Amino acid sequence: MDTETLTTHDADDDPRNRDIKIYINGQLLHRDAAKVSVYDAGFMLGDGMWEGMRLYDGVWSFFDAHMDRFFDSCKAVSLDVGMDRNGIMEALKQTARANNMVTDVHCRLMLTRGLKAKPFQHPSLSRTGPTLVIIMEHSKPATALQDRGIRLATVPQVRGLPMSQDAKYNSHSKLNCVIACLQAEQAGADEGLMLDPHGFVNTTNACNFFIVRRGEVWTSTGDYCMNGVTRQTVIDICRAEGIPVFEKNYSLYEAYGAQEAFLTGTFGAQTPVAEIDGKPIGDGTRPVTQRIREVYKQWIAKDVAEQAHRWT
């Protein structure tokens, strides 16, 4: 049995990434020289928000959807971005040019509350403005992910209620997901399948989760998970293509008996699931997943064409 551990963020090695330049508050620094203070609120407390985006043919796909989520999240936690979305785009352009990057690029855009005057919690101690960091890498998802699929293990760690820490925040505070990832690894799986507080199937530690049953596509209600941009795009694709799609509560019973299952995320798009808790999912043909993948590529191409004027 193949026991190699894979993740939805496995990428083919690219030596160009050893010399990338990273954007920190307007400066572009070699990755070895790019530093953030130990007094930064992001390092000290996980106080920040981030977005993962992909660059295709000089265009950041679904840029507006990512920025809607980013600015909404920052507003919700009273985190001043310090610029509008045009300013963010200019910073992205500057970083891409400095790295000679055009396509097959993944970006992690990170904003923290900035330097703290003292090493304590209160947000008012961050007095010098936010810290904006942009890391871009040449990045293609590893082909083994599509060939073998991801192995999931149901983990005891759950995605919590909105009044504890709302899972809709794409925050730097990822310990909940890290614990789930560790639990999955200790169970011999690639990623953890997380339930919601009521025991219904929710999401994985890194991606949104879908199943296919009798031609229908199911995903969670979205009440307790990151409402991913790719997740919403898949739902929109299903509606446009006449594929029945439901955001609903369902249990492991339905997940184990699914004909297909897949994960969604900006990096891997749609990644097939091979097994859950040691139980194989379907017969490996995955026709609905493949159809969604093909249409998703078409939607990416359309979005790139429509946005191209923003990068001239």
Image (cartoon, rainbow, N blue to C red):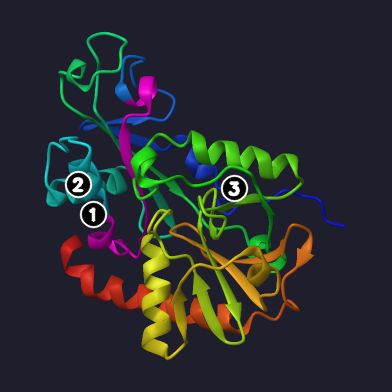
Q: Residue at x 31, y 20 (%)?
A: 40
Q: Do tag 2 and tag 3 residues touch (Cβ < 8 Å)? A: no
Question: Residue 67, which numbered label?
Answer: 1
The three-letter code of the residue at mark 3 reads Asp
Q: CA distance from mark 2 to mark 3?
A: 28 Å
Residue 266 at what x, y percent from top left?
Answer: 43, 59
User: In the figure, is residue 229 to the left or right of 13?
Assistant: left
Q: Quadrant of the C terminus?
A: bottom left
SS at mark 2? helix
Residue 195 at what x, y percent from top left?
Answer: 56, 53
The three-letter code of the residue at mark 1 reads Met
Q: Residue at x 22, y 10 (%)?
A: 117
SS at mark 1? helix
Give above or below for 58 relative to 88.
Answer: below
Give above or below for 308 relative to 12.
Answer: below
Camera-nearest label, 2 or 1: 1
Residue that mark 3 sits on: 13
Q: Residue at x 52, y 78 (%)?
A: 217
The three-letter code of the residue at mark 2 reads Ile
Write down the quadrant of residue 285 in the picture: bottom right
Residue that mark 2 sits on: 88
